[in-house]
Image (cartoon, helix red, strand yellow):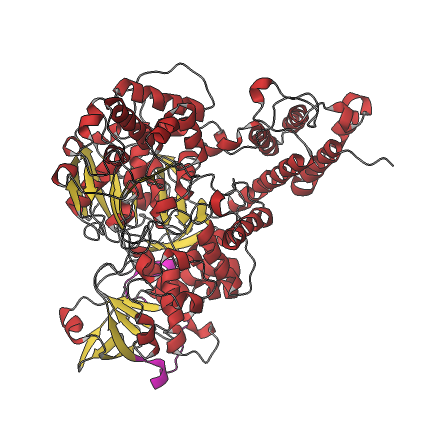
Amino acid sequence: MAVESSPSRFMTNVLSALKRIRGVDLNDARQSYRDGSGLDSSFSNLGQFFRFVDKELRSRDHVAEAEAIAHVAELCTTDPELGGLGIVADAVGWGPDSAPPASNTGSIHTDSLVLREVEFLVDAWLSAVSSREAASRQARPALRRRLGGTPSNAHPMTLTEKILAYHAFSLPSAKGVKPGDVVRVSLDWVIASEVAWLGMLHSMRSIGQQMQAWRNDRFWLTGDHAVDPRNYHLEKSQMLRREMETAKRGLKMTENQGSNYTILHTEFVRERAEPGMLVIGADSHTCSGGAVSSLSIGLGAGDNMIGLATGQTWFKVPESIRVNFTGKPAWHIKGKDVILFILRALRRNTFAADRVVEFGGPGAEYLSCDARFAICNMCTELGAITGIFVPDKVTRAFLDGRKSKVYKSNSVYFAPDEDAEYAAVFDIDLGRVEPSIAIYPSPDDVYPVTERLGMRFDGCFIGACTTTEEDLVLAALVLEVGMKRGLAIVPGKRLVVPGSRPIARNLRMLGLMDIYESAGFEQPAPGCSMCLGMGVDIAEEGSNWLSSQNRNFKNRMGKGSVGHICSAATVAAASFSMTLSDPTELLREVDESRYNELLEQCKAWRNRKHAAVPQRKHAHDGVQDEDVEYVEPALTAATVQQGEAQLSQKGATTSGTTGEQLDEANVIQGRVFTMGDFVDTDAIIPAPFCSSPTDEALGSHCFEYVCPDFRDHVRQGYTVVVGGKAFGCGSSREEAARALKGIGVKCVIARSFSFIFGRNMPTIGLIGFVITDDEFYRLAGHGAEIEIDVQGRCVRVGGREFGFRLDDMELKLVENRGLAEAFRRHRKDVYDALCSGRGTSAEVPSPVSLADVSMQRRKPEGLAW
């Protein structure tokens, strides 16, 4: 029998995949096509074959399968810089001997390697149909149309509460959810970087489990933190890329464009996240998704790995604050200056701490989704859990701009009730916003640029996820004006790093990257670059930088470096003289109409259109006038589960606790190591060491840069860390908590914790709690002997006793030695077990020491943390 050619084998494999994965047999159509002639002679190219399969599937009412095939066909002909394969559409023949038209010389042909990749995509997208069907069987309240006002059967809810209620498997009350309720929720997406993926794998491998995904089409994995084309040859980079490829193949991922295609958040928010979705990500800036009204929350690696495996997670419903935008900003004021203005007004870790920031108001119509991205992106710098905009016409227009309906057909538009209860409400007048700068090392130490003129810098960086496409366009035009003026370009380091290849492509096609090059800006591949200081681009020790990134903590850009943050336009203005300059003078000379035309062209290319370019006045110009149609979660469709209602009660105790008494060995004893306010995760475990494979290896670098003698102290018995406000702020890196545990820390006490770090501790089995009494901190000085009686909720130090509160769910996690171990025992029912009162300490193997697990039993009078 003759050996099948590569195209024939490919077509046979595609038809086999349809039968194997979806049970759809097209062999009869194949045999009858063109009088039974062979596949090679039947179809002259890939496009013709896919159209045949699509038509046959639709004729047999297999619409989901047809749409999967059609989407793969679209990906095949999409430019690689837009996430596709770049195959020549309808080329004559299958192989490289068929020359494409001269205009398509950048495209590739369907050789055997390319066909194998197409075959993988077919397999992945057909598998996605099956995984989507399985996930749709998860409990979720139905929707009903919003008629105005609060539904009669519900209490008023915020936008955050409605999204959580919509995703809840069960509700503590038929009236909805309120702050303090614990809910088990279904997820829409999980996102992670290549470095976070290592931590996620650690969670699974530590319990002998393999990676798994509840939906192969809802995991967004990018190579952006450490990998870079300039270090692909290095062993570490190769390892990270290899693990990404293993994930792609092993999970049959539909969403994996490889390394340095995009910063984690950039293209995810531009092309994937949708209103009403619930997203978790292994990165603190996951909150960027709020730009398109997705409730997007950063968590640690363990939470994300189990979320990926189960499609579920849990939340204690948070309080929200409301920010109402009023007024109209100057046309050149963008999102970065707005969020710096908010940081100056609210300060970090105050009103927003451990809360969600909901944005709206009449001024929001002047804020594009790019501006909203920058604002939501830096809500983590405010200390918030996340930020989210109420969806509106601007949101809908942005979603309509996506080409593929796969990524705009799952939107659910919720709005807060008019009488929803907020912890605080603030009005922000956009007309008062001006170019500002946040001074090292605090993102909320913000001043108008005009008050800090003349600061000198060694380097200027325009990039990081916070810097959006519109920021990059505007900064290029500022540079153009400056060069036309004849401003001298003094020696210094300059970098511009667009957030994704699609953005870089647009800037290049517009000629704007040429402007950056003429102004002396190096142009590395998309990635975190200087913002993280763990890849190729690292600031030198002692150097002083001006950057459009989002975080300016100590050692963030590189050990011993200093960074100040501002808008891209301000960086551009300063880059000529390497001194802080007011960008307003140059911005006044930028042609607003040209700026709008350039953005409209970017939008047309995003749509893959070449339409005439309209003029814009503000963010929602060109959007249809009809109102966005809001809906409500149908609360009566949700089952109220007693176990989850109990977990929502402060101090509630679930069943299954042991009856044995704690002995002396089960009380934490040690000495105190004191720390101050705002101890950030960059300080606890610097980024270059985050890929260390074990807790012990992470611990060997704990406080490497800022307090290297910490490790020796812990080894000498200083095993209880006592910190101040917002302990663990900054990055979501679970490695910070793991490093503390790995070096031997038994407990962390603080005046307050950042949301993610506070959640990461019980997730990995480390106990931590809040004490606010000033007398405790007076007595718990450095080196003081301390005893923690977890059973009695009591700390003894300096001859005094101080009570503390613990949360029931987090105690369960600690009892189970962390979330990963709980997953090992309960598998995909882990959240059902934890939220319903099962999976408690009675099932934990004994003996278990508090020194390792921190808790074996609870008293009924335990209070919520």
Would you identify the image quadrant in which residue 460 lies? top left
Of residues 240 and 642, the one drawn nearer to the viewer in this rendering: 240
* Residue 419 in view in this figure: no
Q: Is residue 222 above or below residue 617?
A: below
- Residue drawn 40% across and 69% down? 742
Looking at this view, is 176 or 589 the one in front? 589
Q: Position of residue 248 (x, y in %)?
A: 56, 46
Q: Is residue 444 left or right of residue 471?
A: left
Above or below, 215 against 9 in this view is: below
Q: Observer-nearest residue: 359 or 258?
A: 258
Residue 138 visible to the viewer: yes
Question: Which residue is outermost to the top?
Answer: 612
- Check the picture and name the quadrant holding the C terminus: bottom left
In this rendering, is residue 142 above or below 859? above
Locate the N terminus and report the quarter of the image it occupies: top right
Q: Position of residue 205 (x, y in %)?
A: 53, 62
Tell me where residue 394 appears, x and y as whole percent: 32, 28
Judge whether residue 647 is colored magenta: yes
* Viewer-proximal residue among 507 and 159: 507
- How many marks do you count on the picture? 0
Q: Seen from this angle, which residue lies furthest bottom?
A: 664
Answer left or right for 698 relative to 793. right
| Residue interval drawn in magenta | 643-669
Is residue 483 highlighted in magenta? no
Q: Quadrant of residue 392?
A: top left
| Left or right, residue 771 beside residue 105 | left
Q: Position of residue 717 (x, y in %)?
A: 31, 79
Q: For the point 57% across and 41% down, which residue is it?
A: 128
The image quarter in which residue 51 lies: top right
Of all residues, the one furthest to the left in this rendering is 451
